[in-house]
Image: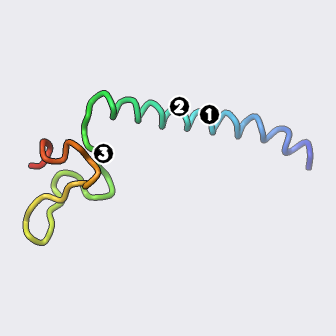
Amino acid sequence: MTEFIAQLLPVAAVVVGLFAIAIGAMAIGQRFTGRCLRGSCGGPKAVGPDGKPITCVGCPNADRHAH
């Protein structure tokens, strides 16, 4: 069992490192472009019951990007 963990640990460390690099790159890209994050809220075509676009409250650029 110890051999299995010894072989698995370097692979797990590489995978975690690659995920950290990918997430970091996405965060840096978002900061440089200044765009609002989209995804779970349905993107720019998501509208509420009043017909107005749904925007993320935490986005400082929400008014600029509303369609």
From the viewer's perspective, tell me whether residue 53 is left or right of residue 6.
Answer: left
From the viewer's perspective, tell me whether residue 42 is left or right of residue 20.
Answer: left
| Furthest-bottom residue in this view | 49
Quick check: 22 above or below 63?
Answer: above
| Residue at image coords 86%, 45% | 4
**Residue 50 location, quadrant:** bottom left
Quick check: 53 above or below 5?
Answer: below
The spot of residue 66 in percent (x, y) is: 12, 49
| Colouring mode (rainbow / by chain / secondary structure / one colour) | rainbow
The answer for how far apart the CA atoms under marks 2 and 1 are is 6 Å
Mark 1: few/some/many CA within 10 Å (<14, 14-19, 20+): few
Per the image, the residue denoted by label 3 is 37
| Residue at image coords 48%, 37% | 23
Q: Which mark is residue 47?
A: none
Per the image, the residue denoted by label 1 is 17
Per the image, the residue denoted by label 2 is 21
The answer for how far apart the CA atoms under marks 1 and 3 are is 23 Å
Q: Tell which circle, 3 or 2, labels the residue nearer the N-terminal end.
A: 2
| Furthest-top residue in this view | 32
Query: Mark 3 is on which residue type?
Result: Leu
Element class at badge 2: helix
Residue sitting nearer the eye, 57 or 24: 57
Query: Mark 1 is on which residue type?
Result: Gly
Element class at badge 3: loop
